[in-house]
Image: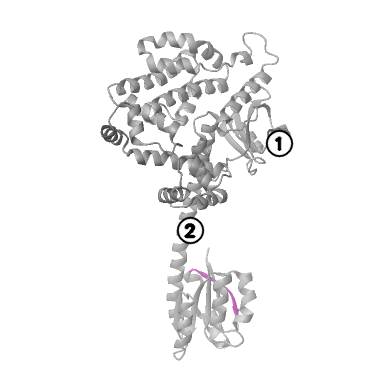
Amino acid sequence: MPYKAFFVEDEIVTREGIRDNVDWKGNGFEFVGEAPDGEMALPLLQTAQPDLLIADIKMPFMDGLELCRIVRERMPWIKVVILSGHDEFEYAQKAINLGVTEYLLKPVTAHDLHQVLQRIAALLDREKQEQAHLEKLRNQVEENRAALREKLLLNLVVGAVSSAEAIEKGQLLGLDLVAGHYLALVIQIDLRTPSEPFDYHEYQRVQQVIAAPLEAQPDVFLIKKDVEELVLIIKGRTAEELLARKEQLAHIIRQQAMASSCDVTLGCGVPKQRITDIYQSFVEALIEVQSVGNRDATGPNGNVGKAELLKINKSAVESYLRCGVKEDLADFFDTFIRPLGEAALKSYMVKNYLVMDIVLTSAKFVTELGGNIDQTIPDLGTIETMLAEVKTFEQFREQIQKILIGALVFRDSQASSQHLLMLRSVHGYIDQHYSDPNLSLNEVAGQVNLSPSHFSTVFSQETGQTFKEYLTEIRIRKAKELLRSTTLRSFEIADQIGYNDPHYFSYVFRKQTGLSPKEYRLQSQQG
């Protein structure tokens, strides 16, 4: 598609000569209009929206410089070529300062203009390619942001992220997660005629229909967990507000699904006050979905009932990971997991929840030992793929054992570290006492029966930080959380995290973050 060119010249002979003798098409342009001066050209330019403007520098009523200035303000994408006489050097300088693309001295020949048109067409081609590349990059960035948002929200509903981390990551991803209460809603999609073959595209269409009116609502976060299930996290000021909001959304969802070939079943959790309790609301929503689906199922072939949706005994899993051996894994599995596993195979959602519970308990254990979760526990994306492939109880057993053995192998590899238990004790003590302004290296060293100098050396070697750096990091992390989630003033926050002097707290905070506490709070609110 050719670019568009517009010509402004007060001398009619010159204007018609250039218009009729230049090979516009051969040089990649379409001649879309002309005018005798800048004033008459402006409305025509707004209509034609050209890519190139060629204008004489001296014209009556509105000269080329004034026209160029207005075009730069209103239509900055237009490339401008100025035609000037030999005695108009001062005008030429002004034109150059206005950012003209080319400057030609009169008399101008068709050959001169052909060369200019070729250069500008090449410039426009490059800019179009660069714009297309930038647009592609923007789309990729947005797709990556969307995937990261989805992963963060999934981590929230399975309890795999702390409140501080969720708020901080959410802010970076454009998610405002701070609220007074939270509630989870599970939407299960089922074909109305189960005997029909699985129709992936119909499920996708129903998801899009249901999601469309929800995605633009700032207090609703949508997770497309799989083709048959959507999860909503709803936030609000009060529990009563959330329950009313839930009824509104349920009405919208049912209306959207009515026109499709699928039915929807909704399960709702109880409103929670803490971000970390969204996980509990999600589990409650799962239980309600299963209860609704099981109202008419009484035989052994019915869906999983509410009584079977028992939580994993996390204490038993933690105890086994701390003290058990691989040889006892079969007995442990049969005692604590088999009863739940057999029920879970009847429901993808329950199977997902059960495996996630084991994964998160194992991940927490590995983290406490100072390990890298990614090296010992499958990531959430891998688990989703694995769950879709697990069809038999033996496959289920194999995957659960693989998760637990990964944690055991890491535990055993760390057993030789003489400082492991000491560091765990130290971190726990600091986490409990960081708000004490008198907390010192000597005090903590005494807790683990080491001399201050030896403790300082061991701590630095094992953590890569000095004691003071670690303590400061803990305090500033807590300060960030309080600045984001409370209205406490700076001196109150300083007192809560162990600084007697609010001015010194502000100094340390700025040194660590590059912002004052006030600036950080404003940035968080604006984000």
According to the picture, the residue beneath numbered tag 1 turns out to be 241
How far separated are the C-alphas under marks 1 and 2?
45 Å
Q: Can you tell which quarter of the image residue 249 is in?
A: top right
Q: Is residue 60 above or below residue 130?
A: below
Q: Is residue 257 above or below residue 45?
A: above
- Decide: few, some or many residues near mark 1? Use Cα within 10 Å; few <14, some 14-19, many ≥20: few
**Disc 1 or 2, which lies upstream in sequence?**
2
Q: Determine whether the residue tagged by mark 2 lies in a helix, strand or loop.
A: helix
Q: Nearer the viewer, residue 82 or 361?
A: 361
Q: Residue 45, how many percent across, how many down? A: 60, 73
Q: Determine whether the residue tagged by mark 1 lies in a helix, strand or loop.
A: helix
According to the picture, the residue beneath numbered tag 2 turns out to be 131
Say whether residue 330 is magenta: no
Q: Is residue 247 left or right of residue 485?
A: right
Where are the magenta residues, as a range? Answer: 28-34
The residue positioned 62% from the left and 10% from the top of the image is 301
Q: Is residue 45 above or below residue 498?
A: below
Q: Residue 424, how many percent across, how many down? A: 37, 27
Q: Nearer the viewer, residue 415 or 264?
A: 415
- Identity of the residue furthest to the bottom in this view: 87
The amino acid marked with disc number 2 is Gln
Q: Is residue 403 left or right of residue 418?
A: right
Q: Can you tell which quarter of the image residue 67 is in?
A: bottom right
Q: Is residue 444 left or right of residue 291?
A: left
The amino acid marked with disc number 1 is Glu
Kindly tell me whether residue 235 is visible in this rendering.
yes
For the residues carrying marks 1 and 2, which lies nearer the camera in this image? Answer: 1
Kindly tell me whether residue 106 is visible in this rendering.
no
Q: Residue 246, how many percent across, how many down? A: 70, 33
The residue positioned 64% from the left and 13% from the top of the image is 302
